[in-house]
Amino acid sequence: MAADRTAAHPGDSLTIVIVEMSSAAASAQSGSQRDTRLAGSIGAGGRVEESGNLGLQGEYEGRGQLNRSGRLVGQIGATVQAVLPNGDLRIAGSQTLQIDGERTSIRLTARVRRADISGDNTVLSSRLADAEIVYDGDGSLSRSGSPALLNRIMSFLGLS
């Protein structure tokens, strides 16, 4: 049956089911303390006696924390670009969606084993090798999540 045909040759298409979740956390803490003291006295024949003290002290404490998580779920059509010498398929696909001025795009390149293509001609993203999945957006909503130019300049200069 034609419906049971799975991708095998350049130009054939298949569906990639993208289910990707990631999370990362990092924290850092550092501190230092320095205390320097200098003391001295001077005398001249018992009549003049002077003394002085100088103290310098410095302290630094810093800490930071970063938590990030992401989730991407969707489906994208891909096309076989080449059959590799070991029989794996080099695939690529892209999809662009524009709604109310917001443009989102998904681009994918990967290598897939024929054994990982299911009977309905789909592959889970977790079964892809050398995968590069890029999800990007552009529009007023996407720009509202980015710092303004002045904030980026201030941050670059270490002033914010």
Image (cartoon, helix red, strand yellow):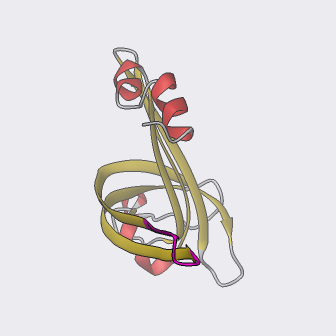
SS assignment for the magenta stretch, majority: strand
Q: Is residue 71 left or right of residue 149?
A: left
Position of residue 67 measured from the top left corner of the image (x, y, whole percent): 27, 59
Q: Nearer the viewer, residue 8 or 5?
A: 8
Judged from this view, the residue extending furthest toward the top is 100
Quarter of the figure that contains the C terminus: top left
Residue 118 visible from this viewpoint: no
Q: Is residue 66 above or below residue 106?
A: below
Q: Is residue 111 above or below residue 105?
A: below
The stretch in magenta equals 44-55
Quarter of the figure that contains the N terminus: bottom left
Residue drawn where x is 55% and y is 39% of the image: 156
Q: Nearer the viewer, residue 39 or 21?
A: 39
Q: Is residue 43 above or below residue 14?
A: below
Position of residue 2 measured from the top left corner of the image (x, y, whole percent): 42, 58
Residue 45 visible from this viewpoint: yes
Residue drawn where x is 38% and y is 18% of the image: 140
Per the image, is 48 magenta? Answer: yes
Q: Quadrant of residue 24?
A: bottom left
Q: Nearer the viewer, residue 138 or 24?
A: 24
Q: Is residue 139 left or right of residue 41?
A: left
Residue drawn where x is 37% and y is 73% of the image: 33
